Image (cartoon, grey):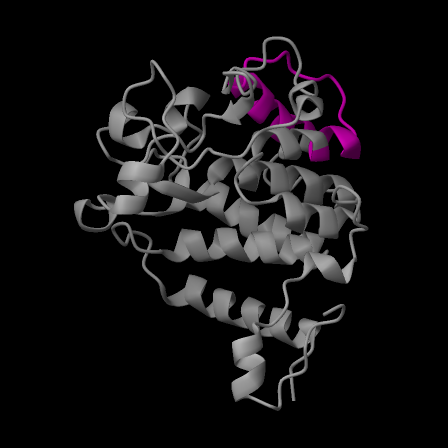
């Protein structure tokens, strides 16, 4: 029988905990113990295990030797800005090599932005004006959105650049939220962690912080990095016209798989 969602999460936590304990601290561009701990923090946050998420994030921040990149804009065009090297803020990313980066999809179908050499990447999704309006004046993350009749993110324009999966900034925001929810200050106060992210973005530090401040910073900092659906489910907010728990937000099992395995049960709503 199909395992329950909770059983799957339990196994994920078990696997990541073991991975953190046995992987080396440095492992080239392969996953290392800090990548495992960072992913564990993300999973624990989804499960509302705030103490577990906080502690995993804190281990990464204090033990990985990584630091926030001082210039937000230089996090992305890795082939241009960083000579092909992953910025120190990346905890794990998909390495694009000369073997797998030069292909017909990247070369001929990436979105090219006029006047920006080296672009033609993966930033083909148009951004709603309502999202852009959320940024404060002077927010450098807003400058990373450009207009050419429509708005696009500049995060993924480098077609031959590495693809970030987990950044250290996420760990600061996870630690901030979990400390706030737990009324603790492990590693740093929630205010200090949020201000580390805001200062890097060119914004004035806050003097007090609320849960809404923290989740807002998380939304703006990690926008267009694949978090939106998971965050909507975690925070129980609608996705467009769909409720956060709508079965339509879960893809169906492909019909081919259903045809060859009669033991499978189709996902709800299909």
Q: Which residue is drawn at 65% across and 81% down?
A: 3
Q: Residue at x 64, y 34 (%)?
A: 218
Residue 161 in sight:
no
**Most extreme residue toward the top, as rendered?**
137
Q: Residue at x 58, y 82 (%)?
A: 258
Secondary structure mostly seen in magenta is helix
Instruction: Answer with the quarter of the image where residue 179 lies.
Output: top right
Residue 220 percent across, percent down from the top left: 62, 29
Instruction: Tally the numbered discs.
Output: 0
Is residue 196 a member of the stretch shown in magenta?
Answer: yes
Q: Residue at x 51, y 54 (%)?
A: 39
Question: Is 188 displayed left or right of 84 in the figure?
Answer: right
Residue 168 percent across, percent down from the top left: 48, 38
What are the residue bounds of the magenta stretch? Answer: 191-215
Dividing the image into 4 quarters, which one contains the N terminus?
bottom right
Q: Is residue 57 above or below residue 10?
A: above
Residue 12 percent across, percent down from the top left: 55, 69
Q: In this view, does 264 lie above or below 244?
A: below
Q: Is residue 258 above or below residue 66?
A: below
Q: In this view, does 242 lie above or below 142?
A: below
Residue 195 percent across, percent down from the top left: 62, 23
Dividing the image into 4 quarters, which one contains the C terminus?
bottom right
Q: Which of 217 and 269 is in front in this view?
A: 269
Is residue 41 a member of the stretch shown in magenta?
Answer: no
Q: Which of 187 and 130 is in front in this view?
A: 130
Question: Is 49 displayed left or right of 162 in the figure?
Answer: right
Question: Is 163 displayed left or right of 147 in the figure?
Answer: left
Question: Is 140 displayed left or right of 235 in the figure?
Answer: left
**Most extreme residue toward the left, as rendered?**
98
Residue 11 in sight:
yes
């Amino acid at each position: 029988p199909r395992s329950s969602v909770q059983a799957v999460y339990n196994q994920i936590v078990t696997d990541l905990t073991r991975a953190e304990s046995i992987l080396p601290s440095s492992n080239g561009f392969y996953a290392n113990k800090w990548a495992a701990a960072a992913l564990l923090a993300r999973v624990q946050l989804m499960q509302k295990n705030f103490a577990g998420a906080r502690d995993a994030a804190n281990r990464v921040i204090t033990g990985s030797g990584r630091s926030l990149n001082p210039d937000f804009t230089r996090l992305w065009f890795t082939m241009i800005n960083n000579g092909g090297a992953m910025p120190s803020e990346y905890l794990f990313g998909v390495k694009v090599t000369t073997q797998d980066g030069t292909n017909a999809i990247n070369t001929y179908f990436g979105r090219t932005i006029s006047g920006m050499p080296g672009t033609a990447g993966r930033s083909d999704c148009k951004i709603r004006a309502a999202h852009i309006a959320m940024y404060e004046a002077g927010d450098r993350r807003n400058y990373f959105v450009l207009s050419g009749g429509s708005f696009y993110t500049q995060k993924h324009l480098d077609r031959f650049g590495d693809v970030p999966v987990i950044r250290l900034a996420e760990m600061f925001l996870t630690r901030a939220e979990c400390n706030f929810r737990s009324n603790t200050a492990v590693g740093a106060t929630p205010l200090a962690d949020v201000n580390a992210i805001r200062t890097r973005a060119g914004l004035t530090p806050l003097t007090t912080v609320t849960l809404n401040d923290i989740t807002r910073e998380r939304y703006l900092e990690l926008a267009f990095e694949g978090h939106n659906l998971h965050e909507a489910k975690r925070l129980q907010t609608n996705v467009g016209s769909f409720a956060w728990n709508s079965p339509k937000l879960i893809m169906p099992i492909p019909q081919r798989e259903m045809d060859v395995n009669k033991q499978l049960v189709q996902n709800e709503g299909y």
